[in-house]
Image: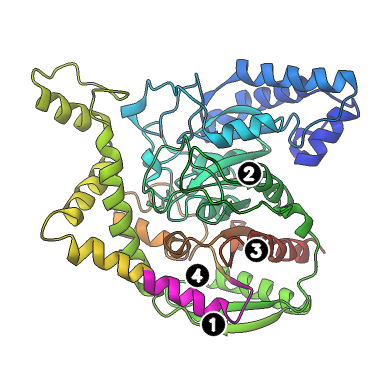
Amino acid sequence: MDINVLTVDGTRIAIQERQTTATAIAESFYKKIASEDGEINGYLTLCRERALEQAHKIDAIADKGDDLPRLAGLPVAVKDVISTKGVRTTAGSKILEKFIAPYDATVVQKLEAAGAVILGKTNCDEFAMGSSNENSAYGPVKNPRDKSRVPGGSSGGSAAVVAAGTAVTSLGSDTGGSIRQPASFCGVVGLMPTYGRVSRYGLIAFASSLDHIGPFAKDVKDAAIMLEVIAGRDPMDSTSAEVSVPKYSDEIGQPVRGMKIGVAKEYFGEGLDPEVKSAVETSIQNLAKAGAEILEVSLPHTKYAIPTYYLVATAEASSNLARYDGVRYSHRSPEAKALSEMYRKSRDEGFGAEVKRRIILGTYALSAGYYDAYYLKAQKVRTLLAQDFDEAFARVDAIVTPTTPTPAFKLGEKADDPLAMYLADIYTVTADLVGIPGISVPCGNSKAGLPIGLQVFAKHFQEGTMIRVAHAVEHAQAV
Ligand code: GLN
């Protein structure tokens, strides 16, 4: 069995038909991880015992000849900001180096209930803050498509393991682009659902009004199936929505004929790499050939998205990260002699430079006297951004854009320039601010062979529409 070509359905069917077993598949993946992940550094922790126990359960069902659940035997990786009971969960930070999560995140429970085999936890930027995975306390991840380049971030490990074939699918989190941007850089599919579509119970919080959990996969269909499994209301997360979950995978192969697809001129301006532009434009022409009507739309407040995001995200982060005080589940400095010194030293030793920068920026933005000028104003701009989309979506069913302005950059290239790094998110942050879903699907390669991603946005809770368009983009390249 060639484990590199496994899909969600292919895995289940191969086990059901007794061509292989879930245990054999898991063992093959661990072998591949042992030989290939050392260089890529996609995994931080493997949970072999737990994975094999789950694989045995699946094999026992297959032995009896009973129907297997949807994700039976599927080798999955989970970003290390998502809690896994009894398994180390670090958020890519030294401050949580020894943290063993006491419970499973709802998404983890759902994956395992559907038969998935969780192989391990993936590397990421510390507390999901970053666009290159270089902010991880456990070393950077290398892009499997070109190991001199970054995989993107912050879910760099989750994108890289799918691209490298050391997992079939994975979960990541997206606060400003952290699923879609690394998917684009690594040449895989990354899906950010609508805010409220997927429970965040058990997700280590970065910015609570922006955080989302979503899947990575090799193709749009597998991403759709993953979403089907993890979506839905969860009483443990009051921000999860009471909206029924459609069968997203039914959208695969549905025609785009007659659909209205918007192209926003603000996403094709200055700073866009010509090769990215041309690959995205070719895909748009393919959508037109498939019968979609292409319309120009305008999202005039787009230019304010990056500053707005970096105010809201840092403000919320400064509040969320206050809990790492050395008292409860984080690193405690052994040297401190008084309580306040213990807080200070523990945080100073445990947090990396980017996390400290964000806490300082966020605390400033929330401080008395500046709150109205910064945080409140940013929330108002958020409303303007949402109105841009309301107006555009009154005319179109979906909007397509490049996912990132350039293909993957070199390791170290932007590491000392936070502002240049922040601009890598220019096309992704708005969807997080507005709460609409977005997907990145590969749409070609640069001359140097680097993957290029196309992004599709849809209205709130219309992930099906987005999946249909993304699949059409994927399909047009295959023919
Ligand atoms: N790169 C963005 C940041 O650094 C987004 C991160 C994310 O989506 N988690 O904040």
Residue bounds of the magenta highlight: 383-399
Q: Is mark 2 within 8 Å of ligand 1?
A: no
Q: CB of mark 4 within 8 Å of CB of mark 2? A: no
Amino acid under disc 1: Val
Residue 273: numbered disc: 4
Q: Is residue 304 left or right of residue 115?
A: left
Coordinates of residue 374 in the picture (x, y in percent): 21, 63
On-image quarter of the C terminus: bottom right
**Hey, which quadrant is residue 203 in on the image?**
top left
The local secondary structure at tag 1 comes to strand
Mark 1–mark 3 distance (CA, rounded to whole Å): 17 Å
Q: Which quadrant holds the N terminus?
A: top right
Task: Work out whether mark 4 precedes mark 2 in sequence or the reverse, and give the earlier one.
Answer: 2
Q: Position of residue 16 (x, y in %)?
A: 87, 29
Q: Residue furthest toward the bottom?
A: 296
Which residue does the numbered mark 1 point to in the structure image? 297
Residues at discs 3 and 4 in contact (Cβ within 8 Å): no
Q: Residue at x 54, y 28 (%)?
A: 38
Residue placed under numbered mark 2 in the picture: 163
**Residue 58 appears in the rendering:** yes
Upstream in the sequence, badge 1 or badge 3?
Answer: 1
Q: Residue at x 44, y 49 (%)?
A: 211
